[in-house]
Amino acid sequence: MNGSNARHPPPIDAMACPGRGGTFISARNSSPLSHVRRCSAESQGHFSRTKPSNLNKKKRTIEMSTTTTEIQAGAAPIKLTLAYDDKTHDQYKYSHYLPVYDEESSFPALEPFEFSDRGLAADREKPNLLPRDNTATTAKRLTPVIGTEIRGLQLSRLDERQKDELALLVAERGVVVFRDQDFKDIGVDEQKDFGRYFGPLHIHPGGAHVKDHLELHNIYLGPDNEYRNQNKSNKLSTIGYHSDVSYEHQPPGVTILTLLSVPETGGDTAWVSQTAAYARLSPPIQKLLEGLRAEHSGFPQADNARRDGKFVRREPVKSEHPIVRIHPATGQKALFINPGFTKRIIGLRDEESDALLKLLFKHINHGQDFQVRVKWEEGTVALWDNRVTAHTAISDYNVHNPQEGLRHGFRITTLADKPTGASGLGSTW
């Protein structure tokens, strides 16, 4: 099938600054993230980089040793807190992808939108993506249950038929890892265009992003990231399986992640197959879960951000999603809960809900026979389907030791369908 715009509302895009004088920048009205408030620069591309203590105006920023950038637009400046130092910026090849926190842009609640999965248009045999007679492209299963690694095929050069087949492959295998890619060097506009083929682009309500491109959620774990390092977890382990922002009314489908800088060792990512996790359960438990919904909440995430002095761009939401959802392209059933955002099971007593969630979370966390761990290499891009997987970063190296390297990249997350469970059980909010 040709094109995707007819089925997916276009996501929000930051428009180019028009020059001196300063204007408001608004999203396209057809986006589910409509009416975003953005201010342009006083002069295109001009920034002043000063320490918070030197700013003349009162700043709504965290009092720490980060740098603040102010983009003047009349009386309404955009305030960006930078989570890196000048030395890193000046010496780093991908400095334009370093993380900032836009403390001015705000958004209304996401609006419902029609969605049709790209995998529905795919040839099930995938002859365009993985032709049998093409020896230059190799695809191997990383485990029997989850994960496929592909070499010899550039994401940036895929046509629509190949992208449709890729969407189906990601749904079937949970995560697909591409090696030796030029994706990080094709430019932000092409990166966003690639992502929006699979669905509207999500903007994280509170996370770091690439300057001028809130759709590129930034992952940056370095010794100069005061936002991350001043608010350390008090847990024994950094493992935290989750499905990206599953509290959204129409949660994400495909996520695309690439790392621009990786440690020499460590900093891997692990995924768990929620399809296999469901299949391993006994039939009585499967039947019980198929009739239940669970609450996914963004309130703790927003509350923690505000507690730490960060800006929340959109008011938090919660949704009640089926615990077992059916993927629209494969018809497979998968658990749709995760320790990151799932808070309770609707209709059960607190003790019952807690006990059942504890069982399921342990099942997900400890299911090493349906998990895969991926080591990042130069030029690696991973695509996964949040509807059938959960994932976690593994921070097993010393972030404060520059000799161990920097873990930095960005994520493009696409929104998808309203979850549907067995017997038509749907989401509510």
Image (spheres, helix red, strand yellow):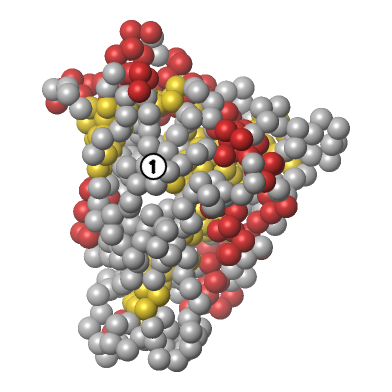
**Residue at the location (59% across, 44% down)?**
382
Residue 218: x %, y % from top left:
46, 59
* Camera-side residue of 425 and 177: 425
* Camera-side residue of 108 and 407: 108
Q: Is residue 262 above or below residue 369?
A: below
Residue 161: x %, y % from top left:
69, 41
Residue 318: x %, y % from top left:
25, 43
Answer with the quarter of the image where residue 76 lies: bottom left
Q: Label 1 amino acid?
A: Pro
**Residue at the location (20% across, 27% down)?**
346
Q: Is residue 77 above or below residue 96?
A: below
* Camera-side residue of 81 and 160: 160
**Residue at the location (22% across, 83% down)?**
58
Label tally? 1
> Is disc 1 placed on a helix, strand or loop?
loop
Residue that sits furthest to the front in the current view: 6
Answer with the quarter of the image where residue 339 lies: top left
Quarter of the figure with the C terminus: top left
Q: Is residue 303 above or below residue 174?
A: below
Which residue corresponds to mark 1? 251
Q: Is residue 213 left or right of residue 137?
A: left
**Residue at the location (64% across, 46% down)?**
2
